[in-house]
Amino acid sequence: MTVTIKAKALEAFVADIFASAGCSRDEGDRIGRYLVSANLSGHDSHGVVRVPRYATQKKNGTVVADVTVDVLVDTPVIAVVDGKYGFGQTVTRRAVQIGIDKCRNNGLSAVTLRNAGHVGRVGDWAEMAAEAGLVSIHCRQPPRAASWWRPYGGVQRRFSTAPYCVGVPRPGHDPLVLDFATSIVAEARCWWRARAARRSQTAR
């Protein structure tokens, strides 16, 4: 049976979950908005399927609610931002805004974010920069980065999937966003499909 859920209702439901888990309402709303946005963009592996994992991380203390980031290095064009293990939807948004502000003031910027929870669909952050009229490039190093993928023709896992994203504004049109893994398939998509298969087998 297929059930249709309105996006706004799903956002509110996710927000309620994280508000109940100890996040502020603003942070819950933000998490809900970005997770549902991933589903609407066709990236279900980065959407509301993440809610149980995020909630478990919050319960275990590996992700912290309502973090205010620390800027450890701050020059006119460079920043190193410590996310202090906050939710990615909160700390990444702040890091990208820092980059936007520096770029507007100086013509370019480079920002690195460390100690952050899962940052979600990276294309969201390229779209955020594009809305500000800026071209942006986003790279991410996943955890356990040295042990996931084999190089072509290799027999041992050596590389990470190293997600890569570029956003280009197009005035009067939707931005051009390239958002992809550098492997044949993204790790998150494999995880999502394996999880769905396990649920299907359990249901039988």
Image: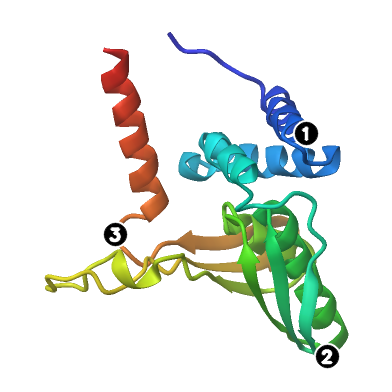
Q: Which mark is residue 201?
A: none
Which residue is most to the right? 105
Percent x, y of residue 202: 30, 19
Q: Residue flagged by tag 3: what amino acid is it?
A: Ile
The span from disc 2 to disc 1 (Cα, nearest Å) is: 36 Å
> Which tag, 2 or 3, sits closer to the chain's start?
2
Q: Is mark 3 on a helix, strand or loop?
A: loop
Q: Residue flagged by tag 2: what amino acid is it?
A: Pro
Percent x, y of residue 137: 59, 74
- The image quadrant where one finds the C terminus is top left
The span from disc 2 to disc 3 (Cα, nearest Å) is: 38 Å
Percent x, y of residue 136: 65, 73
Q: Nearer the viewer, mark 3 or mark 1?
A: 1
**Pointer 1 local density, CA inside 10 Å: few below 14, some 14–19, many at least 20:** some
Percent x, y of residue 96: 73, 68
- In this view, 47 is above or below 128: above
Residue found 76% across the figure and 82% down from its top:
72
The span from disc 3 to disc 1 (Cα, nearest Å) is: 37 Å
Q: Nearer the viewer, mark 2 or mark 1?
A: 1
Place residue 41 in its image quadrant: top right
Q: Residue 19 carries which label?
A: 1
Which residue is most to the top? 1
Residue at image mark 2 = 76
Q: Nearer the viewer, residue 17 or 185?
A: 17
- In this view, 60 is above or below 119: above
Position of 176 with respect to 106 (left or right) is left
Q: Is residue 170 visible?
A: no
